[in-house]
Amino acid sequence: MTFQGNEHPMARRRQIYEGKAKILYEGPEPGTLIQYFKDDATAFNAQKKGTINGKGVLNNRISEHVFTLLAGIGIPTHFIRRLNMREQLIRQVEIVPIEVVVRNVVAGSLSKKLGIEEGTPLPRTIVEYYYKDDALGDPMVTDEHILCFGWASQEELHDMADMAIRVNDFLSGLFAGIGIRLVDFKLEFGRIWDNDYSRIILADEISPDGCRLWDIATGEKLDKDRFRRDLGGEVEAYQEVARRLGLFPEGEDSAVLDLESHRKRRGK
């Protein structure tokens, strides 16, 4: 489906939710949604805002690839199929209000909070939980908080932590094989209901927006830290991740983004 200017595809469908990086629309069948990837970029709980042209196209392809691979090793996900350059069909879930962060190397807020030099390898992988509330700045919480306030059950928490470690093991190997260190990343989970019974599945996206990815040889950042820290070259970094994953033949990613840019110019 083509569109022009700033008009979103599925504009005549009912919008369910708009977040910082994605829009969810009513899906074609009950229990489904259409997830649209925006070019909007935010950092520091939306205190910094901007646009990375073509980011949505790249994140859609990268997330599709990663979720497909994870499904292949038995990780249940909300992903059904990619529809076009910016959209994918997903299962509708009840989002658990907890972000699960997995850390392999000291970086970002962990470095600032503890005064440990960024880049220090962790002797063991750390799993952290953050309560999803922009107004509160997504505060870090413990499993005791999660259980006390009923944000997730003990069984759900166990399932999320188990899947997070499995995803980390798989993705660490995947990225290492293409010369990238998986420093840390964020996951979100949702509930799928079958009458009175629910189960936890992986939701949201996995892309350079929610992962810290460093080139193993040079330490170059290939993720949203380039936007957070005003380093520039955001699109090129995302393109490099996609290229190394084999998602675009040489030059095809640039051609896709040029097409996107042309469509937007025609719509103005």
Image (spheres, rainbow, N blue to C red):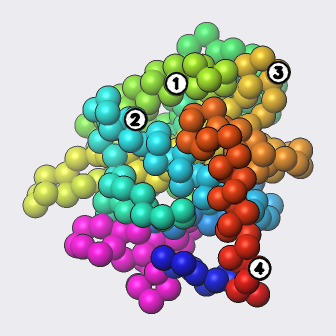
Reading the chain from its start, which is encountered first: label 2 or label 3? 2
Reading the chain from its start, which is encountered first: label 4 or label 1? 1
What is the CA distance from the residue labelled 4 to the residue labelled 1? Answer: 37 Å
Residues at circles 1 and 2 in contact by the CB criterion of under 8 Å: yes
Residue beneath disc 4: 265
Q: Which mark is residue 218?
A: 3
User: Tag 1: Cα neighbours inside 10 Å, few (<14), some, or many (≥20)?
Assistant: some
Reading the chain from its start, which is encountered first: label 3 or label 4? 3
> Residues in magenta?
10-34
The amino acid pointed to by label 4 is Arg
Nearest to the observer: residue 40 or residue 59? 59
Residue drawn at (76%, 87%), measured in percent from left and top? 268
Residue beneath disc 2: 69
Q: Which mark is residue 174?
A: 1
What is the CA distance from the residue labelled 3 to the residue labelled 4? Answer: 36 Å
The amino acid pointed to by label 2 is Leu
Nearest to the observer: residue 122 or residue 92? 92
What percent of the width, then of the height, locates residue 40? 70, 65
Tell me if residue 31 is in the magenta stretch. yes
What percent of the width, then of the height, locates residue 64? 46, 48
